[in-house]
Image (spheres, rainbow, N blue to C red):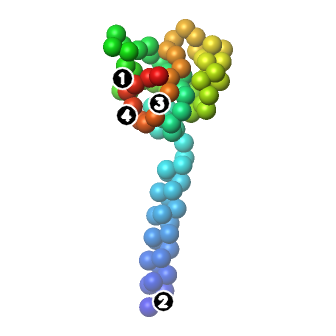
Amino acid sequence: MVAMHFKEFLLAFTLLLVSGVIAIAGPNGNGWDGAGWYVNSNAPNSDGLYRAQEVILFRGPIDQEQNCRTIFLKLYSPIGGCHYFKSKSDDRGR
């Protein structure tokens, strides 16, 4: 009886551990790794918005705009720009 409870506990613990590792493993396929400044691959549309589905993020999150601009100018200029994204579905740059 104790062995059965131990196996259930071990299974539950393993699932929790794996889900935690997946959650903190790093950026998703689009480069999202939390709110902050990112160098992205496209400029704003005519309405000034950045469509999330069109954005490929190269770096981030970077805590300050100036640091983002430095990385952008050294590595990625003239494509894209630096923009602050609050969430994965945030389609507005700053």
Q: Residue at x 45, y 83 (%)?
A: 5
Which label sits in the foreground, 3 or 1?
3
> Which residue corresponds to the image point at 53% horizontal and 20% vertical from the top-left?
82
For label 2, the residue is: 2
Q: Amino acid at mark 4?
A: Ser
Q: Is residue 8 above or below residue 58?
A: below
Q: Are marks 3 and 4 in contact (CB under 8 Å)?
A: no
- What is the distance, in whole Å, between disc 2 and disc 3 at their CAs? 50 Å
Q: Position of residue 24 (x, y in %)?
A: 54, 49
Q: Earlier in the sequence, mark 1 or mark 2?
A: 2
Query: Relative to residue 91, is residue 75 depicted above or below?
Result: above
Residue at the disc numbered 3:
85
Q: Secondary structure at mark 3?
A: strand
Left or right placement of residue 87 versus residue 79 in this view: left
* Spatial separation of the CA atoms under disc 1 and disc 2: 54 Å
Residue at coordinates 43% horizontally, 36% vertically from top-left? 87
Q: Secondary structure at mark 1?
A: loop
Q: CA distance from mark 3 to mark 1?
A: 11 Å
CA gap between label 4 and label 1 equals 9 Å
